[in-house]
Image (cartoon, grey):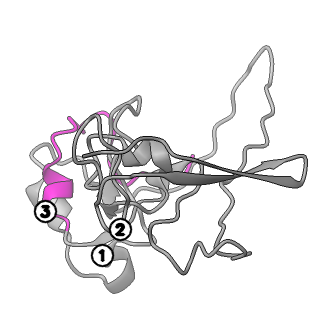
């Protein structure tokens, strides 16, 4: 198991560590639409609801300074000495899942994803409408991620067996 640097048995998910952490990074969970701290919960419904420290972003691991999360943790759950461990388990079955990563449209920028901050991927609208993110303004209104203006119409590019199918559809007109 990879180190969390937060003791799961001691962590009470009080958010004190994340509140005091000065390092903000792009949140990969929602496609970079928001920022998260170097100490974080991967997503709001995570089970167990326990924090972890991103060693690649944490100021302590990068510069041997800070340790704010350790100082303000009320239960002493921060453990910078945590190490990778190997588990040997006896099991009755093994499920192998290869996993995947979301495609980065900026690599092949055919449709101007990098040129316009209001172009989103098919996974981003779910996060845009999520009330916990800064781009959501009202539960019934979808706002564009950059300008925070109400979405009046949208265009979709759908890849189906390698062929691009385009259609434009006006979703709704807001007064």
**Disc number lying in front (1 or 2):** 2
Whole-Å distance between the Cαs marked 1 and 3? Answer: 13 Å
Q: Quadrant of residue 68?
A: bottom left
The residue sitting at 22% across, 38% down in the picture is 13
1 and 3 marks in contact (CB < 8 Å)? no
Residue linked to disc 1: 60
| Secondary element type, mark 1 | helix
Instruction: Look at the numbered discs 3 and 2 and tell me whether their residues touch, using CB distance below 8 Å.
Output: no
In space, the residues marked 1 and 2 are separated at their CA atoms by 32 Å
The residue that mark 2 highlights is 146
Please give the range of residues in magenta: 1-21
Disc 3 target residue? 20
Verify whether residue 47 appears in magenta: no
> In x, y percent, where is residue 33?
40, 60
Residue 21 image-quadrant placement: bottom left
Near mark 1 (Cα within 10 A), the count class, few <14, some 14-19 or many ≥20, is some
Q: Is 2 in the magenta?
A: yes
Q: Is residue 9 above or below residue 159?
A: above
């Amino acid at each position: 198991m990879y180190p969390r640097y937060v003791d799961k048995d001691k962590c009470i998910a009080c958010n004190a560590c994340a509140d005091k952490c000065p390092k903000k990074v792009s949140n990969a969970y929602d496609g970079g639409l928001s920022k998260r701290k170097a100490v974080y919960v991967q997503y709001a419904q995570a089970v167990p609801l326990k924090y972890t420290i991103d060693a690649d972003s944490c100021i302590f691991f990068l510069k041997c300074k800070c340790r704010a999360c350790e100082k303000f943790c009320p239960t002493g759950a921060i453990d910078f000495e945590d190490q990778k461990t190997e588990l040997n388990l006896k099991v009755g079955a093994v499920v192998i899942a290869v996993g995947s990563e979301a495609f980065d449209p900026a690599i092949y920028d055919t449709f101007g994803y990098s040129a316009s901050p209001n172009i989103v991927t098919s996974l981003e609208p779910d996060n845009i409408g999520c009330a916990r993110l800064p781009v959501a303004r009202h539960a019934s209104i979808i706002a564009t991620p950059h300008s925070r203006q109400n979405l009046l119409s949208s265009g979709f590019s759908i890849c189906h067996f390698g062929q691009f199918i385009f259609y434009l559809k006006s979703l709704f007109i807001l007064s």
